[in-house]
Image (cartoon, grey):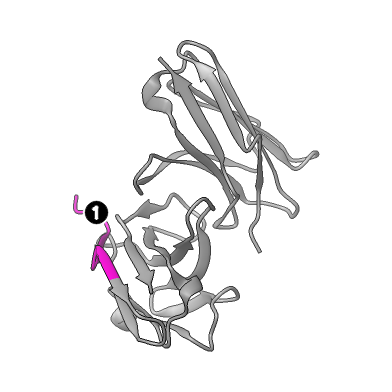
Amino acid sequence: SQQGEEDPQALSIQEGENATMNCSYKTSINNLQWYRQNSGRGLVHLILIRSNEREKHSGRLRVTLDTSKKSSSLLITASRAADTASYFCVHDMRFGAGTRLTVKP
Amino acid sequence: EAGVAQSPRYKIIEKRQSVAFWCNPISGHATLYWYQQILGQGPKLLIQFQNNGVVDDSQLPKDRFSAERLKGVDSTLKIQPAKLEDSAVYLCASSFGGREKLFFGSGTQLSVL
């Protein structure tokens, strides 16, 4: 079965705004990862956060992890049109259904 | 550094035919994964290899799908016979160790008619 469910399923924002995506999971984790997939196929790794970490940053990306609530969030600040893509959380190497982000110029 | 190589890029077959996909992971990566991604969905893990041993094939439809990783490097995924619902992109990924950052190939888009 797929692990990690993202919320919302789709998100549309204006360039410059922040985008927040959430992920929930059901079982214990060693780590949780976030990936981006542009139209086409390319899947790219964004961030890996381990179970003993609460927050991690990478450029305009910020990921938080709350193991007590079995949830994680991905924040993209100052979004750009190029951020338009699907974003997936991955737990135990299983992908969720993803959040489709559209950033309007 | 060379990435994950997959071939073919596209494949069109008729139902009940057989098809095989090939993957060459990044050199030195012990773990190799095959995913199936149906349009509009997230990738679904089919099988995970650690070197040439299977770690997880719980979601592999074993009545028609098979995979092997000889010598712990290249891998092939086969479907025999194909069904219409097998139409999807088949993605290969590798990582240095298990449960670590995945590096994906470009995938093979399969259309079953």
Residue B77, percent from left and from top: 37, 77
Label 1 crowding class (10 Å Cα cut-off): few <14, some 14-19, many 20+?
some
Element class at badge 1: loop
Amino acid type at image mark 1: Gly
Residue B28, percent from left and from top: 29, 62
Does residue A71 sit above or below A41 in this rendering? above
Does residue A11 sit above or below B29 in this rendering? above
Residue A88, percent from left and from top: 54, 43
Q: Any magenta on residue B61?
A: no
Does the rendering let one see residue B39? yes
- Choose between B110 and B51: the one closer to the eye: B110
Q: Chain of mark 1?
A: B
Residue segment shown in magenta: B1-11
Does the rendering let one see residue A76? no
Q: Any magenta on residue B6?
A: yes
Residue A38, percent from left and from top: 38, 39
- Choose between B2 and A38: the one closer to the eye: A38
Q: Is residue A70 left or right of residue B19?
A: right
Task: Give the residue at x 44% y 73%.
Answer: B49
Quarter occupied by residue A3: bottom right
The residue indicated by pointer 1 is: B3
